[in-house]
């Protein structure tokens, strides 16, 4: 093979190796999304159950830190599967978006459990669940620990995704 800089022939063993990093292609991005989505649903369900009926408050911050870590690791696993890779901003943004959606899913799960376990309800469950009812629930239930937990979820998902 000819070295274009010097015009000399060099044996293949002396050729510079290609990058050892794997790059993000469409298939890896879809796998990262799939794994992240699975983690997001699990974290959201756990957050919701711990919000209601368990009624955990400040401990939700620790749950969020662990949940953000799980989401970030799931995205990493889906995209890279342990192979060396450069940092990727698009996966980090995906992790933050999925973390915030996990928090919303958790709040919705706690709303549904609240409606499901409502004593003396006269309406069927599907009639009690509505967007207006969810926004009213959010206004009543939201507290500072939920905001801190949402931030912790997003920060940990960002930091863990590489």
Image (cartoon, helix red, strand yellow):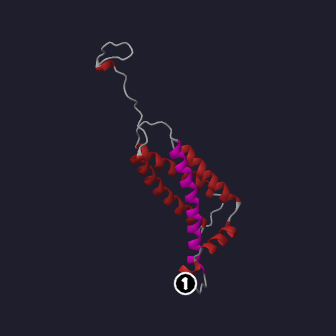
Which quarter of the figure has residue 51?
bottom right
* Total marks placed: 1
Which quarter of the figure has residue 112?
bottom right
Which quarter of the figure has residue 5?
top left
Dot 1, how many residues are within 10 Å of its Cα: few (below 14), some (14-19), or many (20+)?
A: few
Residue 96 lies in magenta, yes or no? yes
Relative to residue 114, is residue 41 drawn left or right?
left
Tell me if residue 106 comes above or below residue 11 in the rendering. Answer: below
Tell me if residue 114 comes above or below residue 106 in the rendering. Answer: below
Query: What residue is shown at x 30% (from left), y 14% (from top)?
Result: 9
Relative to residue 100, is residue 4 drawn left or right?
left
Residue 143 screen position, x and y as percent: 70, 62
* Disc 1 target residue: 124
Give, as a single range, the part of the protein colored magenta: 89-118
Residue 4 screen position, x and y as percent: 36, 17
Residue 135 lies in magenta, yes or no? no
Observer-nearest of 55 and 17: 17
Observer-nearest of 30 and 142: 30
Query: What residue is shown at x 59% (from left), y 52% (from top)?
Result: 153
The residue sitting at the bottom extreme is 122
Query: What residue is shown at x 29% (from left), y 17% (from top)?
Result: 11
């Amino acid at each position: 093979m000819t070295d274009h800089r010097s015009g000399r022939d060099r044996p293949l063993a002396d050729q510079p190796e290609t990058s050892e990093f794997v790059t993000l292609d469409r298939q890896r991005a879809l796998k990262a999304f799939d794994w992240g989505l699975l983690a997001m649903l699990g974290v959201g369900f756990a957050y919701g159950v711990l919000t209601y009926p368990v009624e955990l408050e400040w401990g939700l911050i620790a749950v969020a830190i662990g949940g953000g870590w799980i989401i970030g690791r799931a995205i990493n696993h889906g995209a890279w599967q342990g192979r060396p890779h450069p940092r990727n901003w698009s996966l980090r943004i995906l992790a933050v978006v999925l973390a915030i959606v996990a928090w919303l899913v958790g709040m919705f799960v706690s709303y549904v459990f609240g409606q499901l376990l409502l004593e003396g309800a006269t309406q069927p469950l599907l009639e009690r669940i509505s967007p207006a009812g969810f926004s009213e629930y959010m206004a009543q239930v939201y507290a500072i620990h939920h905001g801190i937990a949402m931030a912790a979820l997003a920060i940990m998902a960002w930091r863990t995704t590489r």
